[in-house]
Image: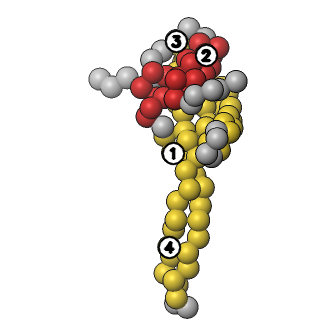
Amino acid sequence: MAELKKYELIKTMIYEVDTDEDSIEYRLEIYRRENVFKGIVYRKELYRMRANYKGGLAKCDESMFSPDNNFNLNLMNYNESEEDIINIFYNELEKNVSSLN
């Protein structure tokens, strides 16, 4: 028989990282099930969309958050507190972005 596990979203945090070349925005979502926590990281990406209308073709740029698997492989592990998730994310961010304050 299948078992349903329910996770509650308890915190969403937005991080803006300014680098020498660009600015990167991340969203960290922290979920809890009983006393178990996990995190999912999304990175804001710019997508070019094209829509066809009777009057012609419309182009628009849209920013959306997409899952960032560079972080999620480590954050999907279950941890004991939401602070653990935040610390793991910050440590991974330091590895990926040099000279992070």
- The crowding category of the residue bearing disc 3, from other C-alpha atoms within 10 Å (few below 14, some 14 to 19, many at least 20), is some
Location of mark 2 (residue)? 87
Q: What residue is at 52 percent from the left and 88 percent from the top?
A: 56
In the visual, does 93 lie left or right of 11? left
Location of mark 4 (residue)? 50
Secondary structure of the residue carrying tag 1 is strand
Q: CA distance from mark 4 to mark 3?
A: 42 Å
Sequence-wise, the earlier of marks 1 and 4 is 4
Sequence-wise, the earlier of marks 4 and 3 is 4
Q: CA distance from mark 2 to mark 3?
A: 11 Å
- The crowding category of the residue bearing disc 4, from other C-alpha atoms within 10 Å (few below 14, some 14 to 19, many at least 20), is few
In the visual, does 2 lie left or right of 92? left
Q: CA distance from mark 3 to mark 1?
A: 23 Å
Secondary structure of the residue carrying tag 3 is loop
Sequence-wise, the earlier of marks 2 and 1 is 1
Q: CA distance from mark 1 to mark 4?
A: 19 Å
Question: Residue 99's x, y, as percent?
Answer: 63, 26
In the visual, does 52 lie left or right of 3? right
Q: Disc 2 residue type? A: Asn
Location of mark 1 (residue)? 66
Q: CA distance from mark 2 to mark 4?
A: 39 Å
Q: CA distance from mark 2 to mark 1?
A: 21 Å
Question: Residue 89's x, y, as percent?
Answer: 57, 23
Q: Disc 1 residue type? A: Ser
Q: What residue is at 56 percent from the left and 30 percent from the top?
A: 97
Q: Disc 4 residue type? A: Arg
Location of mark 3 (residue)? 79
Tell me if residue 36 comes above or below residue 28 in the rendering: above
Q: Nearer the viewer, mark 4 or mark 3?
A: 4
Tell me if residue 66 comes above or below residue 75 in the rendering: below
Q: Quadrant of residue 23?
A: top right
Q: What residue is at 61 percent from the left and 31 percent from the top?
A: 28
